[in-house]
Image (spheres, rainbow, N blue to C red):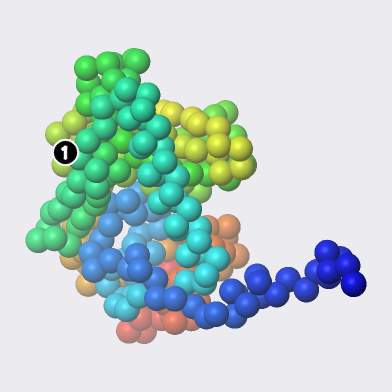
Amino acid sequence: MPDISIINDQSIPARIARAGLYPRQRKRGYLGMSEIGDPCERRLWLSYHVEKQPGKISNRLLRVFDMGDIIEDRLILHLQKSLYHVKNFQEEYSDFDGQFQGHCDGHIRGMYEAPDKWHILEIKSANQSSFNGFVKHGIQQNRMFGEKYYAQVQIYMHYSGLDRAVILVENKNDSRLYQERFRYCRKDALNLYEKAWWIINADYQPNGISKKETFWICRMCRYNNPDYCRKKWEGEELF
């Protein structure tokens, strides 16, 4: 009989990839608190005002999203088994008649540094490079996610009334964990509140983060095309 172990036709990955694109289940009808720290105000404005219908995501990206949910559920279970008190899973915060919403992963108590203080809990996963950057420089210094993660816990603390937060990150390569705690900063939270109000109420698109389509943040943006960000609106210049 032929040795089928040497046949590398990749039929399963190919068939799954050909199965098509799925509606992006994560399209929101509101401005998300988890996104308010995005450094590109144009991307926020476009996602809220222009993109009315859910986009499409590939099977691969759907699996990426699912893995994030799996990691979150597993880490919450591990926290509870480690005698941390965790509650208020997916607690909702809302403002501006429901047009600005967020859902925190939970509230946690029992931190060694402040055992009696309830903290906002946010669970993230990261690849090897991002994780090593978090460990070396701290979450806020991360070019890709730092501003968004920091803003997310600040706005959650603002609406929850809690004054501490912890972000727990799992390395997707080797399952190492990294934690970082934050205190509530009223000034930063109010700036984010005002930013959200402006994005929701602005009747014109703000400037983007860069004029260059090849800028590193723009290269990864789904709006970086003539239909959205690179389109002239009502004859106005783009930037």
Instruction: Answer with the quarter of the image where residue 101 lies.
Output: bottom left
Of all residues, the one furthest to the front in this rendering is 1
User: How far from the left and from the top, in percent, is residue 201?
Assistant: 18, 65
Is residue 164 something one can see in this rendering?
A: no
| Quarter of the figure with residue 10 | bottom right
Mark 1 surroundings within 10 Å by alpha-carbon count, few (fewer than 14), some (14 through 19), many (20 or more) = some
Q: Quadrant of the N terminus?
A: bottom right
Image quadrant assignment for residue 209: bottom left
Quadrant where the C terminus sits is bottom left
- Tell me the residue at 40%/32% (across/down): 78
45 is higher (above) or lower (below) than 149: below
**Which x, y percent locates residue 119?**
26, 29
Q: Residue at x 19, y 31 (%)?
A: 162
Is residue 58 visible in this depiction of the protein?
yes
Residue at x 43% of width, y 49% of height? 70
Please count the marks in the image.
1
Closer-to-camera residue (98/1) = 1
Residue 62 or residue 180, whichever sits in front: 62
Question: Which residue is located at x 33 percent, y 30 percent?
Answer: 80
Report x, y in % for residue 184. Answer: 25, 30
* Residue 132 horizontal/vertical position (percent): 59, 34
Q: Residue furthest bottom?
A: 235
Q: Which residue type does callout 1 highlight?
A: Ser
Is 199 on the left or on the right of 14, as rendered?
left
Residue occupied by mark 1: 160
Above or below residue 77? Residue 44 is below
> As drawn, is 214 to the left or to the right of 96?
right
Above or below, comparing residue 121 to residue 222 in the picture: above
Q: Secondary structure at mark 1?
A: helix
